[in-house]
């Protein structure tokens, strides 16, 4: 093996390691823990981390300002709740009683969310009643 081949081999190895590290770092940044509200409130280790919470929007203390694109509300779990402050585009289906997923982190006792997604009612959900098909 000549010195030129050795240099190309070393440069290729360094380049491959750099690409692998950048891919890993990019994927890791996208990883977000998904936890229920009750577990999040109970586990202080999660409070500084970016997490996704799912719960139901409480009708108490619901404040929506469409012009400023902000919403503040309590996110309910089966036994506990967390106060959420959201800034961004407010989904059309967002309202009291809606099931939502929020993504963000807890700061000073308030969950600051930058992602808010509402759960859509399924057209196949039996709770809407069944219709008989003619024929």
Image (cartoon, rainbow, N blue to C red):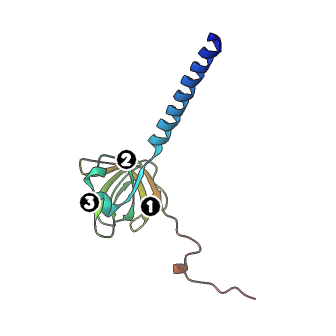
Residue 109, horizontal then vertical, whole percent = 24, 51
Residue 47, horizontal then vertical, whole percent = 29, 50
Using the rendered image of the protein, determine whether residue 56 is visible from the camera's viewpoint: yes
Residue 39, horizontal then vertical, whole percent = 31, 61
Picture quadrant of residue 79: bottom left
Q: Residue at x 43, y 61 (%)?
A: 100
Closer to viewer: mark 1 or mark 3: 3
Q: Are marks 1 and 3 in contact (CB under 8 Å)?
A: no
Closer to viewer: mark 2 or mark 1: 2
Q: Are marks 3 and 2 in contact (CB under 8 Å)?
A: no
SS of the residue at dot 3? helix
Residue for badge 2: 50
SS of the residue at dot 2? loop
For marks 2 and 1, give the CA distance: 22 Å
Residue for badge 1: 94
Q: Residue at x 45, y 46 (%)?
A: 31
Using the rendered image of the protein, determine whether residue 61 is visible from the camera's viewpoint: no
- Extreme-top residue of the structure: 3
Camera-side residue of 15 and 135: 15
Question: Is 81 located above or below residue 66 in the figure?
Answer: below
Q: Residue at x 26, y 60 (%)?
A: 42
SS of the residue at dot 1? loop
Q: Quadrant of the N terminus?
A: top right
């Amino acid at each position: 093996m000549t010195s030129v081949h050795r240099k190309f081999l070393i440069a290729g190895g360094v380049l491959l390691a750099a690409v692998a590290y950048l891919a890993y770092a990019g994927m890791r940044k996208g990883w977000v823990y998904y936890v229920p509200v009750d577990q999040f409130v109970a586990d202080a280790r999660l409070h500084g981390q970016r997490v996704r919470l799912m719960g139901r929007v409480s009708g108490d203390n619901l404040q929506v300002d469409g012009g400023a694109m902000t919403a503040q509300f309590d996110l309910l779990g089966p036994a506990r709740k967390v106060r959420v402050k959201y800034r961004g585009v407010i989904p059309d289906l967002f309202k009291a009683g809606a099931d939502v997923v929020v993504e963000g982190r807890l700061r000073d006792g308030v969950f600051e969310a930058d992602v808010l997604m509402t759960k859509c009612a399924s057209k196949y959900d039996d709770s809407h009643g069944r219709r008989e098909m003619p024929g």
